[in-house]
Amino acid sequence: MIQNIIKINDKNISYTLKRRKYQRQINFIVHQDGSLIVTAPKMCRQVFIEKEIIKHSQWITKQIGDKNNNITIDESVINYMKKILKPIVEAKLLQFNSYYNFEYKRVSIRHQATRWGSCSSKGNLNFNCKMMCLPDELRDYIVVHELCHLQEMNHSKKFWTLVKKTVPNYKELRAQLKNVRI
């Protein structure tokens, strides 16, 4: 990880650059504390990375400003949301996995800043406690999405075919979810 500074609109923005071997594009993540993380392909030139940051500077500065205005959630509220959500997610996993019949290990509910869910290569499923605030159909989509990663650890055509079997309107739901801020 490399710490860098770039000037955007007469303001110095610091960012952490992470280079990844198998990454294909440049991604930006603004954490709750307003810090910017830029992930880029390992062989991508610094000049190109900085051009992309400038190209997306309006979005980046808006995100940083929004994060600085966020309301923080008390730890006891987070723990309550985790406690309530876990049996809901476990029931949904049983429901959808009765179709897929995939094997998974641990199910965790976490307070995450950038993801709704994740699936590890060991078969552990993780879900964001903020799913409590989502409508049922979006929660179902997230559960199915992570469940299907047990079979396909990517977003290939095979993966989306698996998702579509139990969530035929996944494209609509995915678009809706992109509009929800974590």
Image: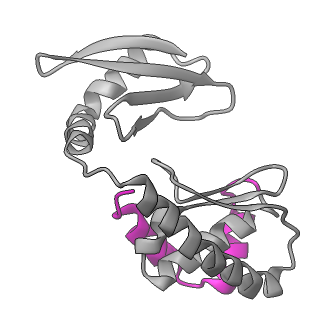
Residue 106 covered by magenta stretch? no
Of residues 16 and 132, the one drawn nearer to the viewer in this rendering:
132
Q: Is residue 17 above or below residue 137?
A: above
Q: Measured from the top left, where is residue 104 in percent x and y? A: 84, 65
Of residues 43 and 180, the one drawn nearer to the viewer in this rendering:
180
- Residue occupying the point 60% across, 17% down: 43
Left or right of 30 on screen, residue 10:
left
Left or right of 66 on screen, residue 140:
right
Q: Measured from the top left, where is residue 27 in percent x and y? A: 46, 36
Q: Measured from the top left, where is residue 28 in percent x and y? A: 41, 35
Q: State whether the magenta stretch is mostly helix, strand or loop.
A: helix
- Residue occupying the point 67% across, 82% down: 92
Residue 177 covered by magenta stretch? yes
Left or right of 45 on screen, residue 9:
left
- Residue occupying the point 27% across, 31% down: 55
The N terminus is located in which quarter? top right
Left or right of 61 on screen, residue 39:
right
- Residue occupying the point 42% across, 38% down: 29
Of residues 15 and 87, the one drawn nearer to the viewer in this rendering:
87
| First to last magenta residue range | 153-182
Residue farthest to the left, as pictured: 10
Q: Measured from the top left, where is residue 36 in percent x and y? A: 37, 29
Q: Quadrant of residue 41?
A: top right
**Image color mode:** one colour
Marks counted in the figure total 0
Q: Quadrant of residue 6?
A: top left
